[in-house]
Image: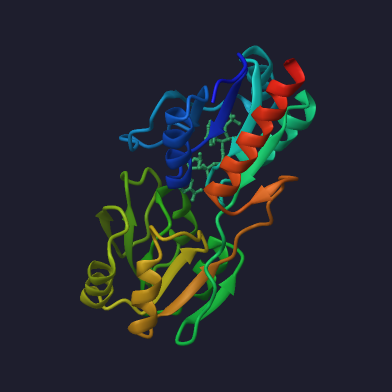
Amino acid sequence: MPVSDQSILLLGGTTEAAELAQILNAQGFPVTTSLAGRTANPSPVDGNVRSGGYGGVEGLSAYITQQNIALIIDATHPFARQISANAQQAADQTRCPLIRLERASWQQQSGDKWQLIQSEEAAARLLPAGARAFLGLGRQHIAPFQACDDVHFIMRMIDPAEVALPRHHEIILAKPADYEAEYDLLRQYKITHLVCRNSGGNASYEKIRAARDLSIEVLMIERPKPVAHHVVESTDAVLAFVHSFFISVLRSTC
Ligand code: NAP
């Protein structure tokens, strides 16, 4: 679809954002994907990519104006609340439309042994002495466990941690895997507790299924409420919005 000289800012860092970048680029929409720039080797993304923070709401507002951004798609991770809040505020300031893609949460099923909690700090308090805990949290979220001297941790992360670690720990540098691998890992390390965030989506769900089948207790960190005004759950809903938005832009310029 031919579009005006305005472009789309796609706040990314997720599988869904990469998928949207691929489809929108293939359809001829001018899209720039924005990444935080924290991962050493990020997965490749189609089209224009910019990396690094904006310096808060004011910096993002300035970017939106300078780059003639017509539409913001916030497809960041459900727990990346700071950038989402900044994006909505900057969108309001600049009167730029924003659509938030937030994948559905995982729902507890029969056989799951979940305890719903609000934070990593709560998880650290609840882990009993002698537990063998698997942390599927990412390196920037493990600091609250540092003082848990009586728990043995298996920590999986993509890049090495840069914070002080608890006394008893093993680190696995890897991404989430398929069901069989997750099942074997939880069993091999004799995991008694799994600590994770309710991220939703398929990519990291297999460890939850494996925990269910192994009767492992899960300390499930609930996600904060979205701050965006317009929230959808699927990439299809975002694409439909983008199409109708640019059709109305073209109509208004004819
Ligand atoms: P956050 O706490 O919400 O954001 C912290 C700051 O990082 C923001 O204020 C912004 O800096 C910068 N930032 C974050 N995302 C950005 C983006 N897409 N483009 C440009 N700047 C960005 O974010 P986070 O939880 O650290 O996550 C960082 C990125 O990793 C996100 O893009 C997210 O989609 C992705 N990710 C996060 C998780 C998770 O568990 N949180 C999991 C998978 C992927 P300024 O204020 O300077 O603009």
- In this rendering, position of residue 192 left or right of residue 246: left
Query: What residue appears at the point 61 percent right and 35 percent down from the top-left corner?
Result: 243
Please determine whether, in this image, residue 78 is positioned above or below residue 57: below
- In this rendering, position of residue 86 left or right of residue 9: right
Q: Position of residue 175 (x, y in %)?
A: 30, 53
Colour mapping used in the image: rainbow
* Image quadrant occupied by the N terminus: top right
Query: What residue appears at the point 61 percent right and 65 percent down from the top-left corner?
Result: 118
Query: What residue appears at the point 38 percent right and 75 percent down from the top-left corner?
Result: 209
Front-most of 99 and 239? 239
Res 162 → quadrant: top left
Query: What residue appears at the point 41 percent right and 35 percent down from the top-left corner?
Result: 22
- In this rendering, position of residue 108 left or right of residue 82: left
Residue 67 can be seen in this image: yes
Please determine whether, in this image, residue 129 is positioned above or below residue 247: below
Residue 81 can be seen in this image: no
Q: Position of residue 241 (x, y in %)?
A: 64, 40
Please determine whether, in this image, residue 228 is positioned above or below residue 135: above
Q: Position of residue 3 (x, y in %)?
A: 59, 20
Res 65 → quadrant: top right
In this rendering, the count of numbered labels is: 0
Front-most of 169 and 81? 81
Q: Position of residue 121 (x, y in %)?
A: 55, 62
- In this rendering, position of residue 49 left or right of residue 154: right
Res 37 → quadrant: top left
* Image quadrant occupied by the C terminus: top right
